[in-house]
Image (tube, helix red, strand yellow):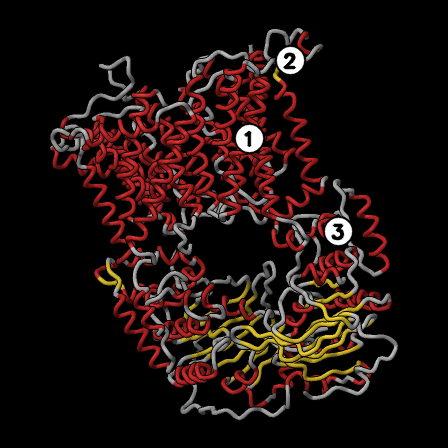
Amino acid sequence: MDNKIGSLLKGPIIKKSMSETLLRYLVIILFTFTIFGLVLFIAGKNPIRAYADTFNSIFGSFYGFSELWVQMIPIMLTAVAVALPSKMNLINVGGEGQLFMGGWLATWAALTFQGLPKIIFIPVLMLFGFLGGALWAAIPGLLKAKKLVNETISTLLLNFIAPLIISLSVFGPWRSAESAAYPQTPAFVDAARLPVIPGTRIHLGFIFAVVALILFWFFMKYTKWGLEIRAIGGNPEAAERMGIRLQWYILIVLCIGGGIAGLAGMAEVTAIHGRLRIGLSQGYGYKGFLLSWITGGSPIGILLMAFVFAVITSVGDTLQITQGVPYAVINILFSLILFVVLAKPVLKGKKK
Amino acid sequence: MIGHSKSVNARKEDEPLFELRGITKAFPNVLANDHIDLNIWKGEIHALLGENGAGKSTLSKIIYGFNQLDSGEIRFLNKTVHFHSPQDARKLHIGMVFQNFTLIPAMTVIENIALFLPDLGIFLDRKQIIKKIDSLSKRFHLEVEPLAPVWQLSIGEQQKVEVLKLLLANVKLLILDEPTRVLAPHEIAGLFKVMRGLKEEGYAVIFITHKIKEVLECADRITVMRHGRVTGQLMRSEASEDKIIEMMFGKTKIKQVERIVKAGTTSSKPILEIKKASTKAQGFSVGLKDIDLKIFPGEIVGVAGVSGNGQKELGDLILGLLKCEEGHKFLFDKNATHWPIGRVRREGAAFIPENPLSMAAVPNMTSQENMAVNNTRKYSRRHGFFIDLDTALTDLKRSFENLGLTAPPFLSPIKTLSGGNIQRVIIARELAQSAELIVAFYPTKGLDVLSTTAVRQVLMRFRDSGCGIILISDDLEELFSMSDRLIVLYQGKIAGHFKPEETNMVDIGHLMTGVRGENG
Amino acid sequence: MIFIFLRGVFSSSLLTGTSLLYATLGEIIVERSGIVNLGLEGILLIGASTGFAITAATGSASLGLLVAALAGGVFNLLFGYLVVTRRANQLASGLTMMFLAFGVSALIGRPYVGAMIKGLQKIPVPVLTELPWVAGSTLFNYDILVYMVIPVAFFVWFLLFYTRWGLSLRAVGENPTAAFAAGRNPSFIQYQALFVGGLLGGIGGAHLSIALTLTWSELMTAGRGFIAIALVIFSKWHPLRAIVGALLFGAAEALQLQLQARGSGISPFILEMFPYVFTLLVLLIWGGARRMAAPASLGRVFHGTE
């Protein structure tokens, strides 16, 4: 009897079936969109029109549809940056800052190594992007490993410092002479630009993101390190007694997470903008955080939910343009979804 | 039951305050209380005596309403009462001082007492509370500095605060659960003074302990428990050490259990050698003092002692989790004083824990994964990119076969298994690898009879094949039947070192409970 | 010259320190009951936006202040639903509330961006403002919230250490089991703490918009909520020590503003980094040691260093 149940329960830690989970999330999303609609209505706006306009812009044109996929790229990467440490119960809110610093170091490389051919330049830039984010995450990593400062707060504080470093560089030594009015670096050479799908802005970063998700999935499920990380997350004392080195993992995992967010920054800088600007990120780091938490760090969940997030972002853009609603209100949608997930409600009479 | 003396139930002056009839309470693995009858009178110190696991704590928690009885009844002044929670017990003026105090270390004595005062006003009038404390503390020898934060107080003083809390809340029956476990000898004298003062003023005191000497010093009435039953009741006037020991430990015959005498000579190089090692005491843990210990290949060294006298610390010291403040440790002929636990395990030490789910297993992982993650070096393939879960499963299954244990589901999260099954998985896991040293920490606790025998046979087999085993256990029969040598831990020190054939359970019982062999 | 500079810094630090202190006091109450509220940044934004909106809409800064306080309290109750009733992870829940506040505050504030308000009235201290070395500066010419902040700190101190309510609250934060054994209801007490903490946080936020800057812009709090959280640790969860901490940080920020205003040659961006770096250093130096001073049952993960 026991063995039958045993084999039935084989599989991922979350024992619910795929369809049950999908249904659950669908209900949550519908619920939140309704609440949001209500909020808009109370604020004197027209939610129906907003949703309709968004639908039109997304599905009405090829370009509009493609923009969804563009939006997904950075947030999938920053979501992995949060999800990986979360498997060890580390809370990395620093995706924003790590993204900035990745973009910053990649910019330095782009401006410094200008003669390189594209086929070498891109990997070099990737390396520097990763390095920038990883080093930025090493600070909270060390502080946490040495039991000095909790990583949630240290990564948060560093988020405020990183954009200032960008500003410092962009207003100062890297400032482009051409566009005196608007602070930004000179445009990157073409060899430094990530290729895009013609007619859209979908760039190579999408491959980075998908690869990152696949690697993350593979890493956690099959590799020795993934197993050890899961052990630390499940029972740090038992893991320690088995000889797993906790401190080492804390530092490495945060650095890798930071590096992945750094890649997102590199992609933004080399694909979308082609230079370093102050407005590098639109809260991608934080969106990644919310994304990871909403999906429980599941790679497939991140992929699917990233699409929903991109739609929500579109709603925000639409609202801003057509009804003068501040873009920041989409935070309400994101946080409501996470709110409901955290509250772990009973759906449709099923047991929690 | 060994028997009640005739005078025990014959107090004609007054009715008992509380009567317990047929109290029975079972937990998943053990029958903690088995039809217990007990009377409690006012103005008496009633000692409840027994070894760990005898059921005394459970019984007292039932009296205090913390646990619910399965069957039986409690009568107060001849009326049946039901306790659904400590609140009910408190209404009848019953209070309990637990082994783990419900004090708040960061707050002062006044604040801790104020929290429990039934009639506290909106404003915290510290002066008024001090007055209340003063009047009681002088009467009952419970002097403490009211303004001191509790963490600054010695354990003995903290205990006084716990008692004051109860008295100020109008408690008339005080239950003290192993109050002397954490006290220094001179503090114990102070406690007895307090208990006597209370008794003289008509309070009833239930004094739970395993220390015979103390019972003889202060109790009026003695109830002895063993394996969940009352094995004897005496008044102090009729009690003697030997009578009590017999009630606590049973007949003094040494059980004849099969012990395979070792063939061949013992190798002269010890697998483990600890020289004059001491560790720091932290919080509730005990500091080890001057430990000298050698374990040779092909022997089982049993460690006897009442839980809380340094066993966990000794295990952690050997494994490398606890640092030697002084002294040295040698493992497999190398200086292992500073080895981290990973190294100790890799070099050939296995660890069988007491509480597997919290100490050795990752709850959400399956048994298969728990097996693999314990030795990722062995099961990693392609430089770490794959974990050979299949081989891990095979090894785990084989280990189970070798041990003769019934295999539970291997592919469900280990936390879904019963406690006994989890233990089996851990034992199978630990003994699957080639180990030269086994630290076994209450390995058969909570196991059914079949598994217990199987585990013991396995340990014997490992011993015969040249393994060195340190067996920490609270089961004296187990220790006597399996150990080649026996040591007794008492308050962090080795209180005695014997071969089982040279001693008997009674003498060991003495050492464990501090009757003989104590320094002062 | 240097005197005017110092005077400016001092006065400035009182002004900027005020909202920080209200926020810190609120968070001390909440953390003393065992809950970490990383969403404090959000409470400040709610207070700032609501306060500004009501003030601009009705012309009454007092009403704006009142509504801001209440809004903060209610918002924190929502947070309480997650962490007290649903027992969700405190750190994640706090951040969720913060993001929610980003959006809600933007929505509330948007119609009033650029509005001119009169703000909280400045009340000059009679004799002191006429002193020669005071006249012409902002010294001793503050709004009511600045004058009240230190008395409020003392009030919080009294509340926590000299009333039954405070004792119960602290007990819940140290050892909920003991509090429960003593007949208290830990969940209810935590909700109360959250409400009061939210009131104070709302006031702190409102001070920024209706007294200090007389503007509203999205995310104007710029991380003050997290600085307040670090201040709670720095002041060892004690309201009176928080005064010192808030003044210190206020001074740091004031120094930075003055240096910026006077064209010190140091890049404004480096100056802006200062509060965050300072906060990190504070946590680094004192966070570990202070861990012992934290309420024993604070959060379940967060002790400043875990």
What residue is rendered at 51% in x and 61% in y?
B323
Q: Which mark is residue B172?
A: none
**In the depicted structure, whether residue B470 falls above or below residue C188:** below
Callout 2 touching callout 1 (CB < 8 Å):
no
Res C123 label: 2
What amino acid type is highlighted by mark number 2? Ile
Q: Residue C88, can we see it?
A: yes
The quarter of the image holding the N terminus of chain C is: top right
Query: Which residue was labeled with disc 3?
Result: B117
Same subunit: marks 3 and 1? no
Residue C202 versus residue C246: which sits nearer the camera? C202
SS of the residue under disc 3: loop
Amino acid carrying label 3: it is Leu
Q: Which mark is residue C201?
A: 1
Q: Earlier in the sequence, mark 2 or mark 1?
A: 2
C271 is higher (above) or lower (below) than B41? above
Q: Which residue: 23% across, 34% down?
A: A68
